[in-house]
Amino acid sequence: MKIMQNARVQADTDTNRLLINWLLSNRQISTIQRDLKTGPFSPFLYPMGKFCFSNAANGQTTEGDGKDKETISVTFLDKDGEEKVIKVPVGMSMLEAAHENDIELEGACEGSLACSTCHVIVMDVNYYNKLEDPTDEENDMLDLAFGLTETSRLGCQIVAKPELDGIRLALPAATRNFAVDGFVPKPH
């Protein structure tokens, strides 16, 4: 009986390792951070809640319980001109923050740099200059964006950091996607 229990524990550990490696390789580590206790993988990942995970996109470290020490203030300006001010944890992308706060920023590819539906316009050039330069992949996707400007970026590539406190982001009037008119994105 003891041998069978050890085999099951080993199988569970191997399953966890495979799952985490898949999530890491598919840029889903933030999902692990957010869903440790409540997400679909919680039965597998909750025991690992005391570990730290590094977000591959920005090098930030977050405790397994998903709590960050610091937040910044971000203002989203929607296509109708209405403003919504939210608090965003340092290390979180603007796409994730928008989804968590019911802001209609689509993100059809879920932040994998395969679309331009999370296109945002940085309203102040001083904040734009504080961002890292866009990668070639991001520029390729921005070329497909509706209403491109000199300060356009993809929301999935803007990661909250203390020097961005107070940033204002405008949502363009439309996106280019195959979604039906009237589509309202749902948080992932």
Image (tube, helix red, strand yellow):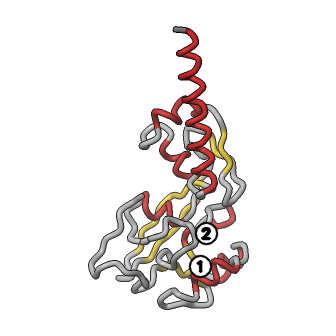
Q: Which percent across, then down, holds residue 177?
A: 41, 81
For the question of whether residue 3 can be seen, the reply is yes
Which quarter shows the C terminus?
bottom left
Q: Which percent across, then down, holds residue 46?
A: 51, 33
The reply to whether discs 2 and 1 touch (Cβ–Cβ < 8 Å) is yes
Q: Which residue is mark 2?
A: 158
From the viewer's perspective, is 52 left or right of 186? Answer: right
Disc 2 is placed on an element classified as loop
Q: Which badge, 2 or 1, is on the more N-terminal residue?
A: 1
Q: Which percent across, then down, holds residue 143?
A: 58, 89
> Which image quadrant is residue 130 in?
bottom right
- Give me the residue at 28% from left, 82% from top: 181
| Position above or below: 88 against 115 | above
State the residue in front, 61 or 22.
22
For the question of whether residue 168 can be seen, the reply is no
Q: Residues within 10 Å of mark 2 (few under 14, many from 20)?
A: many
Residue furthest left as drawn:
182
| Position above or below: 131 against 172 | above
State the residue in front, 9 or 185.
9
- Give me the residue at 59% from left, 57% from top: 26
| Position above or below: 92 against 166 | above
Amino acid type of the residue tagged 1 in the rendering: Arg
- Give me the residue at 56% from left, 36% from top: 15
Amino acid type of the residue tagged 2 in the rendering: Ile
From the viewer's perspective, is 183 left or right of 114? Answer: left
Q: Which percent across, then down, holds residue 85?
A: 46, 66
Q: Which residue is mark 1?
A: 153
